[in-house]
Image: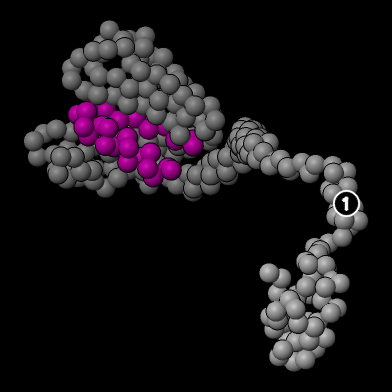
C-alpha cells in the first residue's frame, strides 16, 4: 500500500486521500515527484567544500614532481683543521729550537765571552792592587784543627833564598817586583810552606810556573806518580802538582801575575793553595 507523505508536515496519509488529514495540504502533487525525493529534500552542500580544487591539486602535484631532490649537506671534516694546527705547532717548535740554538752559539756565546772577559778584568785589577804578603793567610783549618801562620819572610830574604835554592825562578828574578813566604805548623809537627812571587805580568808568572813544572817532570823519579801539569792561557794560569817519595806534596800555580808554591803535608798544602786561589778570585 502506497502511503502519501505530506510535503508540508510529513504526515502519513492513506493513498486514497487527496488532502493531508493533518494540515489540509493538497496531496495530488506528491504522485508527480520521483520516489527518491518524496518526503525528504537533502540540503545542497558542495561535495568538495573543504578540499582544494583539482586544478590547484594538480598544480601542487606538478610543482612537487618537478622540484629537484634536496641533497643532504655533508658535514665538513675537522681533520684538515687539526692537521693544520699540529703543523703550526711543530713549525713553531722547530723554529724556536733553532732560534735558541743559534742564540746560544752566537749571541749567547758572545755575551758569555763578554761577561767572562769583564770578570777577568775585575780580577786582574784586584790582583794588581795586592802585594805578596796579602796572599798569606793568617791561618788554615783542616779536620777541625786550626793551623796558625809562622814568621813571614819578606821580599829581600826571599831573593837571597831564590839565588841558592830555586835556579828556575832566579833566572827571571828581574821580572819579580814582590815576594813573601811563611810556614804553617801544627802541634803534631805537621807543617807546610807557602811562597808567593808577584811578577810584572801574568805571562811572566805563567812562564815561571811552566819552567818549574818542566823541571818537576824531568825529575819525576823523585815522585810517587808523574806530576800532573796543565795551564790556561786565557787567564795566564798554570798548575802542576805531585807527591814526593819522602811524603811531601808539591803544588805550583800561577794566576793574574802571581806565582805561588806550596810544599809539605798534603792536607795543609791543598788548603793553602785553595786559600790563595780564593783571594785572587
Work out whether residue 132 or residue 232 is closer to the camera in this orientation and state it.
Answer: 232
Residue density around tag 1, few if under 14, some if 14–19, many if 20 or more, within 10 Å: few
x and y percent of residue 35 in the render?
Answer: 78, 67
Which residue ends up furthest to the front in the rendered image?
16
Q: Is residue 118 above or below residue 220?
A: below
Q: Is residue 11 above or below residue 185?
A: below
Examine the structure image and report whether residue 185 is included in the region drawn in magenta: no
The quarter in which the C terminus is drawn is top left
Residue drawn at x 46%, y 24% as measured from the top left = 231
x and y percent of residue 95 in the render?
Answer: 66, 35
Residue drawn at x 49%, y 23% as measured from the top left = 207
The quarter in which the N terminus is drawn is bottom right
Work out whether residue 20 or residue 158 is closer to the camera in this orientation and state it.
Answer: 20
Q: Is residue 214 above or below residue 270?
A: above
Count of numbered circles in the view: 1
Residue drawn at x 29%, y 24% as measured from the top left = 250
Q: Is residue 50 above or below residue 206?
A: below
Residue drawn at x 40%, y 25% as measured from the top left = 239
Lateral position of residue 141 relative to residue 107, left or right: left
- Find numbered disc 1 in the image and state the secondary structure of the residue it sits on: helix
x and y percent of residue 133 in the render?
Answer: 36, 44
Q: Quadrant of residue 170?
A: top left
Asked whether residue 157 is in view, the answer is no
Lateral position of residue 147 relative to residue 85, left or right: left
Work out whether residue 58 or residue 206 is closer to the camera in this orientation and state it.
Answer: 58
Span of residues in magenta:
256-281
Q: Quadrant of residue 27?
A: bottom right
Amino acid at each position: 500500500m502506497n502511503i502519501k507523505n505530506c510535503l508540508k508536515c510529513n504526515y502519513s496519509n492513506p493513498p486514497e486521500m487527496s488532502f493531508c488529514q493533518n494540515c489540509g495540504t493538497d496531496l495530488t502533487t506528491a504522485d508527480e515527484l520521483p520516489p527518491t525525493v518524496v518526503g525528504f529534500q537533502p540540503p545542497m552542500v558542495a561535495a568538495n567544500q573543504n578540499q582544494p580544487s583539482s586544478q590547484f591539486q594538480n598544480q601542487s602535484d606538478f610543482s612537487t614532481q618537478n622540484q629537484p631532490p634536496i641533497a643532504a649537506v655533508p658535514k665538513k671534516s675537522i681533520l684538515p683543521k687539526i692537521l693544520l694546527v699540529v703543523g703550526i705547532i711543530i713549525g713553531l717548535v722547530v723554529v724556536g729550537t733553532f732560534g735558541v740554538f743559534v742564540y746560544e752559539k752566537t749571541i749567547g756565546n758572545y755575551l758569555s765571552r763578554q761577561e767572562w772577559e769583564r770578570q777577568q778584568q775585575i780580577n786582574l785589577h784586584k790582583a794588581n792592587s795586592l802585594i805578596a804578603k796579602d796572599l798569606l793567610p793568617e791561618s788554615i783549618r783542616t779536620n777541625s784543627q786550626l793551623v796558625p801562620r809562622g814568621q813571614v819572610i819578606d821580599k829581600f830574604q826571599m831573593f837571597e833564598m831564590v839565588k841558592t835554592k830555586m835556579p828556575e825562578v832566579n833566572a827571571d828574578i828581574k821580572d819579580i817586583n814582590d815576594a813573601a813566604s811563611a810556614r804553617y805548623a801544627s802541634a803534631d809537627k805537621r807543617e807546610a810552606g807557602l811562597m808567593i812571587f808577584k811578577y810584572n805580568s801574568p805571562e811572566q808568572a805563567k812562564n815561571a810556573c811552566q819552567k818549574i813544572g818542566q823541571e818537576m817532570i824531568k825529575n819525576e823519579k823523585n815522585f810517587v806518580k808523574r806530576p800532573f801539569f796543565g795551564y790556561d792561557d786565557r787567564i795566564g794560569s798554570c798548575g802542576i802538582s805531585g807527591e814526593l817519595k819522602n811524603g811531601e806534596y808539591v803544588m805550583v800555580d800561577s794566576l793574574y801575575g802571581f806565582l805561588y808554591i806550596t810544599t809539605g803535608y798534603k792536607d795543609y798544602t791543598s788548603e793553602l793553595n785553595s786559600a790563595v786561589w780564593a783571594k785572587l778570585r
